[in-house]
Image (tube, rainbow, N blue to C red):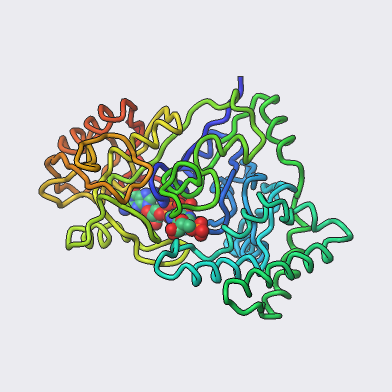
Amino acid sequence: MSYTDILLGLQWGDEGKGKIVDVLSHSYSVVARFQGGPNAGHTIHFDGKKFVLHTIPSGIFREECQNVVGNGVVIDPVRFEHEISNLRSAGYQPEHNLRISLRAHLILPTHRLLDAASEKAKGKEKIGSTLRGIGPTYMDKTGRNGIRVGDIFQADFEKKYQKLKIKHFDIARSLQSDPFIDPKEEDDFFTSLDNLRTLKCENTEYFLNQIQIQGKNILAEGAQGSLLDIEFGTYPFVTSSNTTAAGACNGLGISPRRINKVMGIFKAYTTRVGSGPFPTELLDLTGQKIRDQGAEYGSTTGRPRRCGWLDLVALNYAVMINGVTNLMMMKSDVLSGFDSLQLCTSYQHHNSNTSEMPMNLSEVRPIYTSMPGWNQDLTIMTHSNQLPTELFDYIHFIESFTSTPISLVSVGPGRQQTLFL
Ligand code: GDP
Ligand code: IMO
Ligand code: MG
């Protein structure tokens, strides 16, 4: 019986999803993105090359693997065209193994205008959005005003576009922002649609279900992380899509009955970009040391990532809502060289101790358990039996706390730096 496995981030994004999807993609016939858009930045290193993918699934480097941009994704056609041309310049032919859902919504230049206007209007309370137009595009989707990929093949497309643009200008005015789009930006948008029309745009839900009938397997690639989920994340400091396991069914048209493994990926510590609560954040030299050793700067915006200790209360919550079957621990190498490591095992919340995630995470103070660190350079290790005992103790502690096995430990950005347990 064929199946669909899901791989998703359990923290605030940037856990290393791109790297692992690329590593695992040889076991799947299809890799499919189910939500998010160019707010994502998925980094893949191999053969001395580095790629950062934003909308295109991370299975694209394997010719025999089909890659689907599902209906749950929002597409900025200009950035999409850049991604395609970067791949072409590196010798790939993405048009051969890429399919795009006709139901995916389009990010218009005015969606980006509104993203910036909304952040400006929020002032100090801003979300710290990537300003890629994600929120306004999903708002138009749920408000039933959006424009979908399939619309670009219709005769009335330009009329629809102009109507929505006027509406967006009105909203911009109400947010005290200039209703203005650079004509060059608009030209680029229309040119990029010509490129999109040449690609395989189809009802991808039929393709995906057909693939399963043929006995082939699918890997659903998440973007962002569970703590940025619109339902269960640290609202309102979240993204506008369902980043959790259920989002894979909605965002691809695959039945929940088909889901097999839910692989949850997390960093051995925690990072966050943008605003919002982060109980284990370290604003001191230790936090800076993690940022330096982990090169923690955003793949999409280049912003420094906020860094802190591993939060097991939050991890447990993410394991629960996703039904994670196995965990994958990333960037373990970054924790080398600390005398001791702290793990948040409960929260102080309104004068009591809790291991539950409250609705408002900004109200908690982390309570830590300390464990001994290690000094060995993990990046050169090629087999899990070379890993230091202290790291195994760290792994076993997490497994026991979450009641979930860790099946993979990553010790560097490269494909080979992946140790299976
Ligand atoms: P994604 O958004 O979840 O795909 O993650 P990003 O690509 O935004 O961020 C992860 C970063 O860590 C990238 O620069 C990766 O190349 C890098 N990376 C992934 N795994 C490891 C690892 O195990 N160790 C180290 N040092 N870097 C890693
Ligand atoms: P990947 O897939 C980390 C964060 C932004 C901001 C909030 C809302 O690479 O893990 P948005 O642009 O969606 O309106 O921003 O979510 N954010 C991410 N942080 N990794 C990502 O994606 C992110 N995508 C959005 O920084 O705080
Ligand atoms: Mg990223």
308 and 120: which one is in front?
Answer: 120
Q: Quadrant of residue 136?
A: bottom right
Outermost residue toward the top in this view: 1
Please indicate, yes or no, whether residue 44 appears anywhere in the rendered image.
no
Vertical arrangement, residue 73 with respect to residue 299, above or below? above
- Residue 341, x across and y down, in percent: 16, 45
How many numbered marks, from 0 up? Answer: 0
Q: Residue at x 21, y 34 (%)?
A: 392
**Image position of 271 (left or right of 14):** left
Q: Residue at x 74, y 63 (%)?
A: 195
**Image position of 380 (left or right of 171):** left
- Residue 254, x across and y down, in percent: 64, 32
- Residue 58, x across and y down, in percent: 54, 48
Vertical arrangement, residue 310 with respect to residue 76, above or below? above
- Residue 173, x across and y down, in percent: 63, 75
239 and 206: which one is in front?
Answer: 239
Vertical arrangement, residue 408 with respect to residue 108, above or below? above
Please indicate, yes or no, whether residue 363 appears anywhere in the rendered image.
yes
Vertical arrangement, residue 212 with respect to residue 158, above or below? above
Q: Quadrant of the C terminus?
A: top left
Q: Quadrant of the N terminus?
A: top right
**Image position of 110 (left or right of 260):** right
Q: Quadrant of residue 83?
A: bottom right
155 and 124: which one is in front?
Answer: 124
Q: Residue at x 56, y 45 (%)?
A: 59
Outermost residue toward the right in this view: 155
198 and 7: which one is in front?
Answer: 7
Q: Quadrant of residue 48?
A: bottom left
